[in-house]
Image: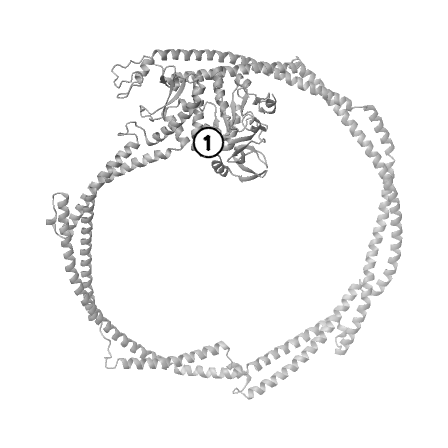
Amino acid sequence: MRLHRLELEGFGPFRERQTIDFDAFADDGIFLIAGRTGAGKSSVLDGVCFALYGGAPRYDGAEKRLRSDHCAPEDPTSVIVEFTAGGRRWRVTRSPEYERPKQRGTGLTTEPHRAQLDERVDGAWIGRAARPVDVARELDEILGLSQQQFLQVILLAQNRFAEFLLAKNDDRQRLLRRLFGTRTYEDYQAAFDQRRKDSERALSSAGEGVQLLLGEAERVLSNDLDADELIAAGAVPDRIAAAAVGVQRADYRVGALTLDRDAADAAHRDAEIALAEARALRTRQEQRDRSRLALAALEERAPAVAAQRSTLERALAAEALRAPLEAAHTATVDDERALSRRDTARNAWVLASPESADVDAEGLARLVEELTGRLAVWALAVESEDALALAEAAITRDRDAVARLEESLTTMDAARALVPARLRDLGDELETLGSTEVRLQAAIAALATLDTRREAAREASRLGDALTAAESAYLDASVLLDRDRAEVTALLQRRLAGHAAELAGGLVDDEPCVVCGSLVHPHPAPASEDPVTDDEIQRAEAARDRAASAEKAAADAARTARAAHADAAARAGGESVEALDLAHADATRAAATARDDDARRTTLSLERERLIETDAASALERDALVTELALARDAFVAAEAAAALDRAAVAAARGDFDSVRERIRDAEERRSLATALLDADAAARAARAALERVRSDVEARIAASVFSSSDEATTGLRDAAARAVLDAEIREHDVAIRAERDRLRDLELALAGEPEELVDLAAASVRQTQARERWSAAVDAVAAASQTATRLRDLVQRASDAHAAIDGAAADHAVIVRLADTLAGRAPNTHRMTLESFVLAAELEEIVAAANVRLDDMSAGRYRLLHSDARAVRNAASGLGLEVMDAHTGLPRSPHSLSGGETFLASLALALGLAEVVTSRAGGVRLDTLFVDEGFGALDDDTLELAMRTLDELRKGGRTVGLISHVAAMKEQLPAQLIVEATAHGPSVIRQDAALAV
């Protein structure tokens, strides 16, 4: 895996977008990430880890802390990393969850965690995943490393790679378990332990099961077979043999009861046959009696059916006359309606024209023709009447337009007369104001200068207090550092004095002494009254290191505060805040006056320009207005002349009516009434002629039918549904009576020779019930005996099989117990190593071997790491111990006894060895980029040179190594640098181009 590019925005100490080009360091192969403490060097590595895994090592996944505290609510937060893995180039864009302003309304809303994964294909970025869960799944396959593995093999975070060297066995086991995923071996161990417990329970319950089975079998013998003599009180085999005899007796009992059941079954079948024959005879007798009653009922309905038959015959005869009868009825109704419409039309005509009430049909026709001719003439006059109304309205509009134009012309002339005087007044006032722009710019410049100087003076005042506090903090930190150094020295002196007692405290019976090798320890050295432990020394050294870091940070802060205070005082010009406030107030008033004068001059200039433009436009508008007035007067005269002709024509056509349209409407109404009367009279005559024709036809048809009159024929009519019902009832009766006579004849023949009285079924039914009860009791007895025999046989067989299986289960249990105890680190496991510890111990051996290759070079052959599989005390994990072989003494020693610089070298070598082994376990992941964060300050010059030479070898094969440190010697040795600086306003920036140019 190789990193190419990193972009940070709104992340950690970086507010503005910062870009790092890792490819620029490819030629050097190793580069330094430098900067003052707290500037944000480690945040660069946090950004890489967050982009790839959604969390940073220093924050333990607390994403909300990743957003920069310098960000405004609307500022974005994002991290972009470009890298190559497996020959393919990828880009990850990720942003944490944070609060941002709502797009609508006020207040804040939560921006969720977002992630985007893109791949570069043929020069373009192609999206591969767009949700955090999908991006995590894709990166897991692409990177081949978990976050924990990544932190151990690529990003060696500050103070993390020393944890593995100095950890206790149990802590080292937890770390190795996360890296190598060996928790499954712990699951194997738990599974075998559970299997051991299950085997114990199975073996214990096997004997109890045999006793329970035999006890149940003996209860069956006693309760169901009355065979108490077969219950034995001896050993299990004797009891099983006795119960087997009981099984034979139960089988014999089943056979005897089966013979009884078969005899009862034959008697039951004979009784059922006799009962069935008696029931069949009684059924035929009952059917004969019902048939006789049904036939009598049908014969009683014969007269009614004959009447229905006559009704149906007359309905069929009347059906042939239905059409003429309905036609006569329809003609009568039409004649009555025609007469009514004629009377209605005559009444309406008389009401509208009383003078023409006696006019005949010919007179009405002539009147209609005369009205039609007059309507044609009056229709032409309607157009003239409409045109006259429009002309009158146009004349009124023209008259109003002429008056309006004359008034506008008068008003415009009065307004233009005031313009020359106003122009003279504006010119005089502009000349009085003079040039205001120059005065305004000078006032603004003076005010800006005073703003800068006043702010600098205020900053100098604030920085003076900060300088005093920083110098005081530096003095306090120096005192604490001296105290912690003295504490470490005192503890080491006490530790050396009690070293023999410490060695004696680690002696274990039957294990060799680390000094003399003896298995017997008769006189171990007594412990001192106040022994010093490794934890106390470790805590004291940690406190000393923290105090040293705090002292250095306090010194840097005091130096920074002095420089900042001097810079602010120089920018203030040496004046006080009070003096600059007074000068600033005067400059503010002068700037306000100049700004008001400039605004007044601009307003007056605009007004004069608008007045000149308005006067010119008014002159053009007056000329157009004069022309428009002349045209309006001409139009008014022409319209008045045309209207006079239309008035005469309309008056002649109107007559005595209010309008021509009203006269036309009256004439059209009279013509319509006359026409309606003519049409109604013709329809009435036609309806009467049709009625007379239909009546003649009906009378002829009635005379030729069976009916004497049309009313009688109408009475005989039936609709189709009624005729169908009559026909169906007649047919049903005829069919029913024939069928019933045939059925009764058959039954009489079948019962010939049988008595007329019904057969009695009670005696046959009693005999059948008694036979069924005897058979049912026999069946139940056989079933109960069979069930008892089967249950007894099953109990005896199960007891015999369980007794035989106990011996094999005991042998299997012994094997399972030994294997489970061995995997759990119990006897016979002499090393007390669990299965998981055994696997991790093998991995640790490979890690130590890889680490010693580099530690031998970095320590000039003095130190080598040793893997110890000695049995741990106090139930700690065995097989995961680490020791350091010191070539100067030839004795192994605890890693906690190393100095700060020695601890860093050993930890670095172990971390690099761990990286190699973890990488090989991850499928051979190629590591082209590596980071080491801090720790170099604890090395002397010679040791630093050895460490740098080891790290320099890591860049072979095109690998790029990034080191985070503020050690001055490293800045001199590494020309390729990435500088992280904190600005005066708080946020940090990254300088790469300038560093590379140096």
Residue projecting furthest to the left: 229
Q: From this view, report whether residue 977 is shown above or below residue 774.
A: above
Residue under the image location 40 percent in, 32 percent down: 180
Q: Which residue is mark 1?
A: 147
Identify the colour scheme used: one colour
> Which one is nearer the viewer's eye here, 288 or 266?
266
Quadrant of res 186? top left
Left or right: where does residue 919 sit relative to residue 260?
right
Residue 775 lies left or right of residue 420; in this view the side is left
Residue 111 x %, y % = 54, 35
Whether residue 296 appears in this view of the structure is no
The kind of residue tagged 1 is: Gln
Please state, as top left, top right, bottom left or bottom right, where the C terminus lies in the image. top right
Could you say where residue 115 lies in the image, as x and y percent from the top left?
53, 36
The structure residue drawn at horizontal position 45% and vertical position 79%, both measured from the top left corner, is 726
The image shows residue 35 at horizontal and vertical percentages of: 55, 20
Q: Considering the numbered disc 1 on the image, is that residue within a helix, a strand or a loop?
A: helix
The answer to whether residue 179 is visible is: yes
Q: Position of residue 784 (x, y in %)?
A: 19, 56
**On screen, residue 679 above or below 462:** below
Q: Considering depth in this image, is 258 or 715 the residue closer to the camera?
A: 258
The quarter of the picture where residue 289 lies is bottom left
Question: Depth check: 942 or 47 in front?
Answer: 942
